[in-house]
Amino acid sequence: MSLHVFLYGAGVSSTLDSPPVPTLDASARTAPRRRTRFLALPEARWALLATAAFLSALPLHFADAPGWTYGPLYAIAYLAGGWEPALEGLRALRGKTLDVDLLMIVAALGAAAIGQVLDGALLIVIFATSGALEALATARTADSVRGLLDLAPATATRVTADGEESVPVNRLSVGDELLIRPGERIGADGRVLDGTSEVDQATITGEPLPVLKTPGDEVFAGTLNGTGALRVRVERDPADSVIARIVILVEEASRTKAPTQLFIEKIEQRYAVGVVAATLTVFAVPLAFGADLTGALLRAMTFMIVASPCAVVLATMPPLLSAIATAGRHGVLVKSALAMERLGEIDTAALDKTGTLTEGAPEVTAVCPATGSGLDEDALLALAAAAEHPSEHPLARAIVVAARARDLRLAPARDFTAKPGHGVTATVDDRFVTVGRPDSGLDADTDAEADTDAGTDTGTGTRMDRDTDVEGGTVVRVERDGALVGTLVLADRPRADAAETAAGLTALTGTSPVLLTGDNPRAAAQVATATGITDVRASLLPEDKVTAVRELQRAGRKVLFVGDGVNDAPALAAAHAGVAMGRAGSDLALETADAVVVRDELVAIPAVVRLSRAARRLVVQNLLVAGTFITVLVLWDLLGHLPLPLGVAGHEGSTVLVGLNGLRLLRESAWRRPDGGRPRAL
């Protein structure tokens, strides 16, 4: 079953006839987890049957009981443990490839053919048990990822002209109105039309406390409603929701392989053919010099077993897939094993500014009434917010938000007009109010990263640049009836964890991150100072960011680029590894990046780089362990006498060992913050 089908075709309905009032305890605030049981896997059941039959036959065999008492039990062990790998091996052979599973079956049958039935059965049992453990490891990795996906409900309550109806969430459309009852999970990304409630968003944004939602606020699919009822308008198709993006990214990751794995698979066939040729040689040469047939065949079968590359094949993917699962649990969606491997290779970090190192939205940082205006800070802010209230410009929204934060009363505005590039005018309390001036450079169509040399006359004879003043913000001039009554300063503040992230990346790479931004040099320098970044490159167009990344790469650096906007997509594609900020990131940036930070926690970036490096170390460890076991066992068999049971135990033991070693990254301790703590789990 695909993860997408799992998400939208299964699960528990979100609608209840008599919804209980929820208590938002720890169990309710985490995604449901499903842990695969060992015996739920068919590989485990067959391995258990083979083991039981083998253990039942063993005492009879050693007690010299008649062959008919233990022979059928050995036959059951051979069939139960060997039929599936034999079938897979034959299918591979039909496709003109040689599977290592087939080598194991041939070796077991060869041992039985020369009277070593017990040794062959032991090989089958250990091989089947190893396969069952590998299947369990894969299932547990999938369980960890699936914990992310068990978030969205299967159904939602849609409000229609005729009343209410319960519909599958995949049939919802943009514009549909949903009723979210207390205790239900929200079925789609949308915006609150009516109602007030606290919504637990920890599974999506990582916020530790429920967030108050009122009309106009955004809500996400899969988040848990509190004690109030909400009416929500669907604003994003279910296939494009945050949860759906996670599903797509995980599916893509499961279908890709790391370069190391691809290299191993490329040589696996040649190696397997070489093992067969070497096995024939090990059998034929001693036989030609008069060796005993049984002894020569037994040595050859042992050689085939210990030389098989099972452990090598398993060395790469478990660590990388475990790392992907662990990163996903903590809100970082790595798109592929290739991407996970690349994240650990970076030695230089390049960061965007607005929306990445900063919040990406302006805030009022200073309210400055003009002398003689008769207004204090609250009165000036309320006047400006009243005039700006009808505007959709980011600066206008920031001013209104600041006024609401102070619980200021906003008078109604009449005759509102907004002129792009000049500001707004309105009549407030029968006074003509202007926020911004024709020469102020306040462009309503310009985003937060736009650079301009236009300025603002502060009324003191000093013309201040739009993008900076002594506090490093955007200056907005407020006039009433043509007279200056004050100015507001707005700034895009650095994220709280920006400095910690920069320090973490510096510690990992040995060099300070590079700040690449389209903003002006002064604004860029202020953010760099606040975050401890020393290499600043400002006023860059999208192609300039790509050029900067490629210059670093030509200098021999492997660059990690972190961004969020459409203008960052080219640099994300050009970098050795790209990470997009997912909560407000553009679709193009999310599609281009190798990994997405779902909840915009910056410190997750150095954490995932460390996790990738840990995965790469485990891959190297596994290859060394596998190579050492194969070398020692092969030399032992060729130069001495390696008993078949010991060869089987050594070969299969190394396979299980590397598999379990790769799963170490599923532990919670594998994910740590730069300060030694642990970010909140998603």
Image (tube, rainbow, N blue to C red):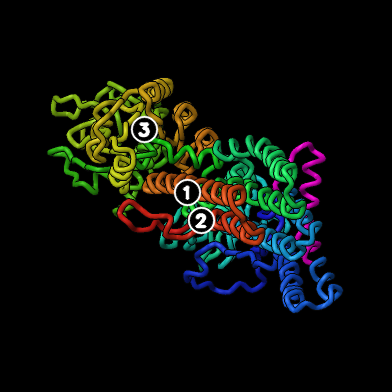
Q: Is mark 1 in CB contact (under 8 Å) with mark 2? A: yes
Left or right of 76 on screen, residue 673: left
Dot 1 surroundings within 10 Å: few (below 14), some, or many (20 or more)? some
x, y (%) of residue 471? 20, 37
Alpha-carbon distance for marks 1 and 2? 9 Å
The residue that disc 2 covers is 661
Magenta stretch: includes residue 16? no
Q: Residue furthest front?
A: 290
Mark linked to residue 350: 3
Left or right of 85 on screen, residue 376: left
Q: What's the amino acid at mark 3?
A: Ala
Res 617 seen here: yes
Establish if 144 lies above or below 432: below
x, y (%) of residue 523? 26, 31
Q: Which residues are magenta?
A: 77-100
Please name which of the two marks, 3 or 2, marks the residue nearer to the observer.
2
Alpha-carbon distance for marks 3 and 1? 30 Å
Residue drawn at 35 percent across, 33 percent down? 348
